[in-house]
Amino acid sequence: MSEPGIDLGSADKRRTLWIVLWLNLSIAAGFYATGYFADSSALLANGLDNSADAIVYVLSLLALNRSREWKRGAARFSGIMLLLFGGVVIVDAVRRFIEGSAPGGGLMMAMAVVAAVVNLACLHLLKRLENPDVNLRAASTFSFNDSVANAGIVLAGLVVMLTGDNWPDLLVGIAVSCVAVHGAVTILRDAHMDVHAEAGTVHPGRGQ
């Protein structure tokens, strides 16, 4: 039996966004701390990712009583943030490849498992929202991306433990960047298509 949805105009929507916001801030802090102690590019990258997510939720809360155009602007800002984040991760991975690093596989796996549980909980809460606007669709994209990234960290941590090499950590850091870029493109495209949806027009690339 399916669960009842949450009306976008209700207090439940605001409460859901606040819950997801604080969960992401907590996970981001955990990623930064464990990333530092584990010397892990992948964990630090996910800390940045969750910080970007938190910004999206703040924008979503600010957009609740704003116009549809304002919401699209907030979504575009979120997409651009993700693109910038992807570049930062790649630069850090290259630096670690050149200078060397010794990531801790066990700590990587433990933090990723905790984060995966939290991100899946966030995704579940967001999916219950009825008729989500462009910002909430962006938030769902972020939570899904985080879950994929967490699975990659678990695998990378295991390989690091078995081999003692740092390349799995760097590889996941770059992979997280690619997932983020893909998510950014999806968000920016969604915001653009929302313009046509509001105007009742068809995007030229879609045709009839």
Image: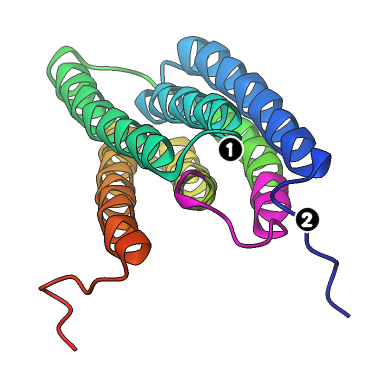
Question: What's the CA distance linking mark 2 and mark 1?
Answer: 29 Å
Q: Given the image, on which type of amino acid does mark 1 rest?
A: Ala
Along the line of sight, which residue is nearer the eye, 3 or 109?
A: 3
Which residue shows up at 56% across the image and 25% down it? 62
Q: Quadrant of residue 171?
A: top left
Other-residue count near label 2 (Cα within 10 Å), few / some / many at <14 / 14–19 / ≥20: some
- Label 1: state its secondary structure: helix
Seen in the picture, residue 1 relative to 171 is either above or below; the reply is below
Outermost residue toward the right? 1
Residue 94 belongs to the span the image colors magenta: no
Q: Residue at x 73, y 50 (%)?
A: 125
Secondary structure under tag 2 reads loop
Q: Quadrant of the C terminus?
A: bottom left
Relative depth, front residue between 202 and 59: 202
Residue 10, numbered label: none
Q: Which residues are magenta?
A: 120-135
> Which residue bears the numbered disc 2?
6
Name the side, left or right, on which 2 lies relative to 144: right
Q: Amino acid at mark 2?
A: Ile
In the rendered image of this protein, does residue 75 appear above or below residue 45? Answer: below
Q: Name the residue carrying label 1.
A: 112
**For discs 2 and 1, the disc positioned in front in the rendered view:** 2
Q: Is residue 124 left or right of residue 86?
A: right
Residue 174: x and y in percent read 25, 38
* Relative image position of residue 160 (x, y in whole percent): 42, 37
Name the residue: 32% across, 50% down: 191
Total marks in image: 2
Apparent side of residue 130 relative to residue 95 in the rendered image (left or right): right
